[in-house]
Image (cartoon, grey):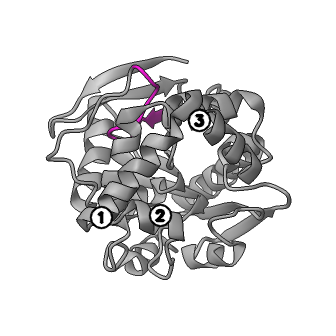
Amino acid sequence: MRSEIVSLPGGVRTRVIDEGRGPVLLFLHGNPDNADSWSRVIEACRARHRCIAPDLPGYGRRGATIASPKSFDYGRAAQVRFVDEVLAARGIGERVTLVVHDIGGVMGVPWAATRIERVRAVVYCNTVAFPAFGWFALARRMGARDAVGRLRAWLLMAALGARGGRSFRAGFGRAHPQLDARELDRFTRDFARNPIAKATTLRQFREMVTADALAGYDDHLRSIAGRVPTTTVWGDDDPYIDTRWAAQLLADDTRVLPRVGHWVPLVAPDEVALAITRVGRAAATTSGSE
């Protein structure tokens, strides 16, 4: 899949997948992952769309991950600026359909709400971009800010790569039985055995699990709702985010996928592609009636 390393004005260097031609789709991945999480969706969409999928700062393939500068703190302003800079680096000035998964929504929702004129439509996939979400215990441990908590989090991350990541792979496979062997190998290689991605996760969670990190996201979601077409595609077997949270996103419609877990783009890429088609048609209808 075609990609390029881009250097952004804010100091971040990262890989960006850029495939296909047509109306632009912007994909923002979750944790612990990278832009490759969208590869199956991109394969389904690139004949009709230009697909842009960046590695979020500090994530990527093992051996090729570029550490994000200390000036990038995963705060809201930095994340919005990152999206702006990725689009500018690829020469994209037209409106885009935003597709987010997991903490990709934490980045994408404030960007869409404050750049609504740049947004054609939004597709949400099992994301936590709402203030009512209570972070699960593992995330809170990884986001510890005190010295002892930070040491424990570092030791936890270091242990993921032990024995070549075999213990991580086995545990991750039990938690996510829908993932195939290829994806389990990829997570093990690009996260459990990737020290830069693990260090980034600790930095990211220290920023995101604070009491006010998601404050105002309900306002962001209301700013998006009704102004552009939105849809949610939700796997109902998610060990992290219960299906009841899907309503928090205020989407025009929600499709719940039975027996699909957290990793919707990997397990149900055709459903995500169909959702993109639905909101694209709705956006075309809305645009034509203006």
Q: Which kind of residue does numbered mark 2 sit on?
A: Ala
Would you say residue 23 is visible in this rendering?
A: no
Give the mark toward the camera: 3 or 1.
1
Mark 2 vs mark 1, CA separation in Å: 16 Å
The residue at 77%/34% (across/down) is 180
In the displayed structure image, the side of residue 246 where residue 53 appears, left or right = left
Res 146 quadrant in image:
bottom left
- The answer to if 190 sits in the magenta stretch is no
Q: Residue under label 1, please give it.
A: 148
Q: Which residues are magenta?
A: 52-63
Would you say residue 45 is visible in this rendering?
A: yes
Foreground residue among 228 and 127 = 127
Residue 224 drawn at (x, y percent): 45, 70
In the displayed structure image, the side of residue 274 where residue 215 appears, left or right = left
Determine crowd level at label 3: few under 14, some 14-19, many 20+ residues with C-alpha closer than 10 A. Answer: many
Q: Residue under label 2, please give it.
A: 139
Q: Which kind of residue does numbered mark 1 sit on?
A: Val
Q: Which kind of residue does numbered mark 3 sit on?
A: Phe
- The answer to if 56 sits in the magenta stretch is yes
Residue 164 drawn at (x, y percent): 57, 27
Foreground residue among 195 and 3 = 195
Residue 21 drawn at (x, y percent): 53, 25
| Labels 3 and 2: the sequence-earlier one | 2
Look at the image and tell me in which quarter the N terminus lies: top right
Mark 3 vs mark 2, CA separation in Å: 17 Å
Query: Do labels 3 and 1 touch, CB within 8 Å?
Result: no
Residue 42 drawn at (x, y percent): 62, 32
Q: Residue under label 3, please give it.
A: 187
